[in-house]
Amino acid sequence: MRVVVTPHVLGGGGPLIAEEIRERRPGIDLEHVDDEDELLETVGDAEILVTHRLPDDVLEAADALEWVQALSAGTDVYDYDALTDRDVALTNVSGIHAKPIGQQVLGYLLYFERRFDRAVAQQHRREWDRYTGGELGDRTVGIVGVGAIGSQVADYCRPFDARVIGIKRDPTDAPAAVDEIHGPDGLETVLSESDYLVIACPLTDETRGLIDAEALATLSDEAVLVNIARGEIVDEPALVDALEGDELGGAALDVFETEPLPEESPLWDREDVLVTPHMAGSTPHYWERCADVFVRNYERFREGDALENRVV
């Protein structure tokens, strides 16, 4: 059973994920291909691809392909219809980002609650002006998408005594750290009660543009928006308008409609916006955790069992 790690692995991580897989499964028939032209020549007899994306020409050339292991939680860059037509399974690594992203979100919350935004601005102005910081225990954190990441955010909020409310597709299956759970029809309630709104849902037809001008207007003028999901879930021009109109307390953004964030974006220059370059899921343990997920699924695949984290 031939496995190919493609050149389309972000951050030059192809050799790293290949090494981690081989350590866990010695003797596996695995090849890392680091040249795109070579990939098209060698992918024909590969049953399994490990990759961050799958160009159309690679899918067309992969005659024996049965399973694609995506090295990301989000899989909106893959052509679901084409994979379905070919009867090719697609799995992701959902869950491995929960700890780093949860910690990133906690950092965002403390950044605004303890007024580090003001501290940084004052430091740049060489201005000494004491102020009072807040406490998360006085705040309500709303989470849109209480999956693996949203649940981890809730867990991290618990020691700070923050009230946590959330939205989950199946509200009957809510983690203990969430004080109040709603189905998708409870969005307005969560918006109206949140001091911090954390976007942690996948990008789908239903969530694209979910946080639009109307949703932003439902948030309080002091609320802070946190987005570590996908940029397209938030209407970015509407967000800029809300910030410029003092209708929001701020925003912490790791993802954007266009990436890299264009130089002309007004989000760069706002003291009430914290911009990070789509790195919330980064961790020194990334490739180890990806390899763990892959090897578990590899054994399932060989045995004909249902695959973990299957998307298609």
Image (tube, rainbow, N blue to C red):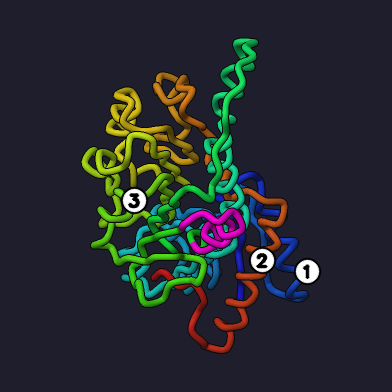
Task: Point out residue 138 in the picture as x, y percentages from the top left corner.
Answer: 49, 48
Viewer-side residue, 267 vs 81: 267
Residue in the picture at 57% in, 62% down: 155
Q: Which residue is mark 2?
A: 291
Viewer-side residue, 30 vs 288: 288
User: Alpha carbon of mark 3 to alpha carbon of mark 1: how far?
Assistant: 48 Å
Q: Secondary structure at mark 2?
A: helix
Task: Point out residue 97 in the picture as x, y percentages from the top left corner.
Answer: 58, 57
Task: Point out residue 113 in the picture as x, y percentages from the top left corner.
Answer: 53, 38
Viewer-side residue, 67 vs 148: 148
Q: For this view, does 246 lie left or right of residue 198?
A: left
What stretch of residues is rendered in magenta? 151-163
State which mark lies toward you, 3 or 2: 3
Determine contact: label 1, label 2, CB under 8 Å: yes
Q: Which residue is mark 3?
A: 193
Viewer-side residue, 68 vs 274: 274
